[in-house]
Each structure stands twice: as C-alpha cells, then as structure tokens.
Image: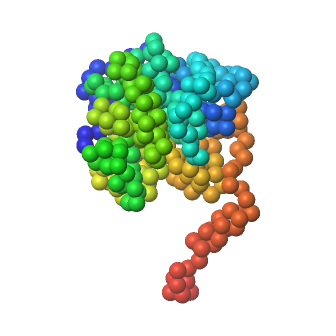
Amino acid sequence: MELAKGRLAAGGLPVMSTSIQLACASDRNYMPHCAAMLHSALSHGAGHGFRIHYLHGPDVPARSRELVAGMIERQGGTISFVEIPDERIDGLPITQHFSRAMWYRIHLPELLPNVERVLYLDADLIALDSLEPLWETDLKGNYVAAVTNVFGPWDVDYPAKLGLPSPESYFNTGVLLMDLDEMRADNCTTALRECALEHGEAFWFPDQDAMNVVLAGRRLPLHPRWNSMSALFTFSASVGIFGSDATDEARRRPAIRHFEGGGANKPWHYLCDQEMREVYFEHRRETPWPNVRLEGLTPANVLRRLTRRTRHRLPRSVGDRSS
C-alpha cells in the first residue's frame, strides 16, 4: 500500500495554503479534552494560521465556549462554534460508549458550505508536529485521506462483515482530511445518514463504520504517523499493514498520537499506561481546565495498579535474584 506522507509525498502542488481549516466536535464532558487537542495543534502551527470550526451540542455552556475562544485567540487562531440541534441527530443510533457528538462530523459538508476542505481531528488525540504537510496533501479526487485502522486478532474479520474487500480497506476516522466540495457534489451526508439509519444498530463503531461503507474506494491512505493509534503500539498486524519502516516511524516519531478506545485507553484514566500519555497532560495544563480529575480512581483500581507494579518488580524466579 502506498502511503501519503503529506506535502512531501503528495506528488502535487501545495493546496490552499492560506490557513488550516480544522474541525472538531465534542459534548460538554469532552470539552476539556478537545481543548487540550486544540492547544497541541496550534502549538505546532507557527507561521500558519488556524481557523477552528467547533461542532457542539446544546449542552455546551456559553462560558466554556468563551474560555476556549480566548485560548485559541491567544495562540493566534480564530474559532467559530457551530451548535448542532438535537433534532439533527434524532434517529441516528447512539450507543453506551459513543455520544451524539460522534455524528456531528458527517454533517460537515452541509455545515460548512463555503469551505472547500477541512481537517477533522478527534478530541482524544494530541498533535506532536506541524499539521501543515498533512493539510497540503493532494487528495487526488478522493473524498478523504485517513490512516488504515489496526485491528486485533479477534476482530480482524470485522471489515469483511461490512462488505469491505480486506482489513486494510477499513480506515480510522479520528483524523480525516476531507474534500468537502467532492462530498457535497455526491451528497455524501445524505448517503451517510441513510446508511446509519438502515444499518447503524448492527455497527460496532456506528459513525466510523458508516463512513467506511459509504466512502469505500474514495479514501487516500495516509502514513500512520498522522494517526498513531494505541493499537499500532500493541498489535503486530501494524507491520503487515504499513511495513516495518513506517510502523517504526509512527511509533518513534508520531505527528499525531491518538488515544482511541475506551476506559483505561484514555490518558485521563487512572489505569492508563499508554505510550506518550504525558503529552496529554502537558497540553491540558495550558487549557482553561488545567486540573485533571482522573477517571477510574477507585480503591479497587488503586490496589490493582499497586499489584501490577509490585508484580513487575518481583524476580521471575529464584535464579533472577542477584546475590
């Protein structure tokens, strides 16, 4: 699989170099995490303006929006908030693990009618390098550019259940460079909604699955350093998908570190032991919500973590003990 590494490997002229149009989405609970993501993105944007399009529901207070806007302006960016009424999401499948906000991104072509392309970033990731090369990637007529999702051995057959030709066909939607003009021309938002309404209850990852089904064949594969998922550090399948060199680069020098998954996969969870967890806290401290109340901080989890650390320090056998 040929991987687009950004501007240097795009094979075309730089596209739309005025400012990076960056979209994100969250509900009230995820706003502090989204703020940390935005701070990280703008921290690496010296010399390149950012225009932020923040999609949110009615539950986000005006004061929280003001605080985020102040942070963005201090970093030299501009921001607009786009409220998504509940009626726009009504009927779309919502699960215990995914909020209504997961559906906001599929409406971007309609919500931003005067924007040609946008870079969408999930709230649970941190940028570690300039996003300019990614922004200037030549999409070559595709709807989106995205990194192939890495599956564990127990769910590697899931893409086939969606009708996709191979596991490598399935992409992760946490980082999406989207050609909104192309998507508008082909009424992709309508197609995505229809797919979700018809099949969403059977989907494991409702919005992501719908995008993979509807946008199949019109996705440009990206180098994994643009979405260095936790699964990339965990599963050996990464090497088979991306090759050893690309996998190694994405692990050692990611441009975007994505803490996908639930529970202890998130850096703000007490039991999280994911690679590069600390970068989340570095940027969270610079947001309007610098203090982090860790999820999962319970007596049972404190004991579990203590037991885990003790086990790692104990010798594996008598022969391991130094004399």
Residue 213 placement: quadrant: top left
Residue 267 at x, y percent in the picture: 60, 48
Q: Quadrant of the C terminus?
A: bottom right
In the image, taking residue 20 as reference, residue 285 lies left or right, namely: right
Residue 163 at x, y percent in the picture: 31, 44
Residue at left offset 46%, top offset 34%: 197
Residue 284 at x, y percent in the picture: 64, 38
The residue at the far top in this view is 114
Q: Answer above or below: position of 49 versus 254.
A: above
Camera-nearest residue between 245 and 2 = 2
Colouring scheme, one of rainbow, by chain, secondary structure, one colour: rainbow
Camera-nearest residue between 155 and 199 = 199
What is the count of numbered marks? Answer: 0
Residue at left offset 45%, top offset 12%: 114
Residue 259 at x, y percent in the picture: 52, 46
Q: Answer above or below: position of 310 versus 97.
A: below
